[in-house]
């Protein structure tokens, strides 16, 4: 199936196209490589390949000034000064995921410097300053998808999903704002996603379903989309150490992936309205 033009990827990294892969669709899973999934969970097929010129045109935008925070992605790299400030925490030496938070808690003076520099950096991406710290995530390596919830003494993975960080409907998902996620790990992690907004998904499904009998909502839209369009390609963008992405995670199907990695995965996330791209 052809990629449609939808969610656009913008970047000020000259070689960002080399960080992109596409595949041939998704599949329903109950378990995969030791991870147990919720019912009706979908993950990408392992048919990754370099995108064709046509596919690149569908998923990438060429002018960051046209970035639309409600539906587009941006990938960049944090400044060297901020990177050096994070380096003083020596996060890359951590071998146990449960050592991550104590590393921050036991280096309060350095964390204050990080917070100051990080806030100044993030202000470049928000015209209103409307953002806040969300969380630091840490996880074991080599997971095909990352998002999971602890249910009845076990972690269950979600697969491709929308975040639902606030209450919204399919038609208001674009109003939820977006988030920035910075890779603090020593290895490359990836963002896997379907390059369609919720409105685009809705419009595709209304030609396949009787939406009066089966109304779409944020809880069921992923299941219905991947059931009816299993061969719609998934896109994968590599996020290297100290690179970051800005994404409207309530408005498109996605998940993080650490497939193939060996070390602890660490990210820091802020949510809000990141609505501008600084110009060089």
Image (cartoon, rainbow, N blue to C red):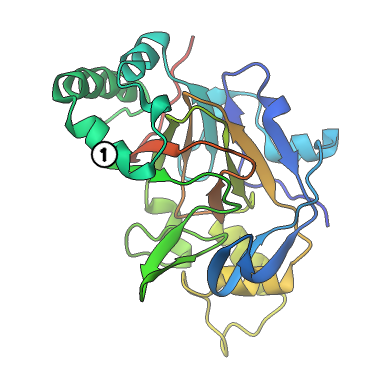
Residue 249, horizontal then vertical, whole percent: 46, 50
Residue at the location (40% across, 64% down)? 149
Residue at the location (15% across, 25% down)? 108
Residue 158, visible in the rendered structure: yes
Residue at the location (71% across, 27% down)? 17
Q: Which quadrant: the N terminus?
A: bottom right
Give the mark count: 1
Residue 38, horizontal then vertical, whole percent: 52, 73
Question: Circle 1 sits in a helix, a strand or a loop, which is it?
Answer: helix
Rendered position, 81 above or below 64 = above
Residue 183 vs residue 102, the one in the foreground = 102
Residue 147 vs residue 203, the one in the foreground = 147
Residue 270 vs residue 159, the one in the foreground = 159
Answer left or right for 222 relative to 25.
left
Answer left or right for 18 relative to 253.
right
Rendered position, 48 above or below 233 = above
Answer left or right for 62 relative to 262.
right
Q: Which residue is mark 1?
A: 101
Q: Quadrant of residue 206?
A: bottom right
Rendered position, 144 above or below 73 = below
Residue 46, horizontal then vertical, whole percent: 76, 52
Rendered position, 141 above or below 25 = above
**Residue occupying the far front of the picture:** 95
- Crowdedness of circle 1 by 10 Å Cα count: few (<14), some, many (20+)? few
Residue 272, visible in the rendered structure: no
Residue 176, horizontal then vertical, whole percent: 37, 52
């Amino acid at each position: 199936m052809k990629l449609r033009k939808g969610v656009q990827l913008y970047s000020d990294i000259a070689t960002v196209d080399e960080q992109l892969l596409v595949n041939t669709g998704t599949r329903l899973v109950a378990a995969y490589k030791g991870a147990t999934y919720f019912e009706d969970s979908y993950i990408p097929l392992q048919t990754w390949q370099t995108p064709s010129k046509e596919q690149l045109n569908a998923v990438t935008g060429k002018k960051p000034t046209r970035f639309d925070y409600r539906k587009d992605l941006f990938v960049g790299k944090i400044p060297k000064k901020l990177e050096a400030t994070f380096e003083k925490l020596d996060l890359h030496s951590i071998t146990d995921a449960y050592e991550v938070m104590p590393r921050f808690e036991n280096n309060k003076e350095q964390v204050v410097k990080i917070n100051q520099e990080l806030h100044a950096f993030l202000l470049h991406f928000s015209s209103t300053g409307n953002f806040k710290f969300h969380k630091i995530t840490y996880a074991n390596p080599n997971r095909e998808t990352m998002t999971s919830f602890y249910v009845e003494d076990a972690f269950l993975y979600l697969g491709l999903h929308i975040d639902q960080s606030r209450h919204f409907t399919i038609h208001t998902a674009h109003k939820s704002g977006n988030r920035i996620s910075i890779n603090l790990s020593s290895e490359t992690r990836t963002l896997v996603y379907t390059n369609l907004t919720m409105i685009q998904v809705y419009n595709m499904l209304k030609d396949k379903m009787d939406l009066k009998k089966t109304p779409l909502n944020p809880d069921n839209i992923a299941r219905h989309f991947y059931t009816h369009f299993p061969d719609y390609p998934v896109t994968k963008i590599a996020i290297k150490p100290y690179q970051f992405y800005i994404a409207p995670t309530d408005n498109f199907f996605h998940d993080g992936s650490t497939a193939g990695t060996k070390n602890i995965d660490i990210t820091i996330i802020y949510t809000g309205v990141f609505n501008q791209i600084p110009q060089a």
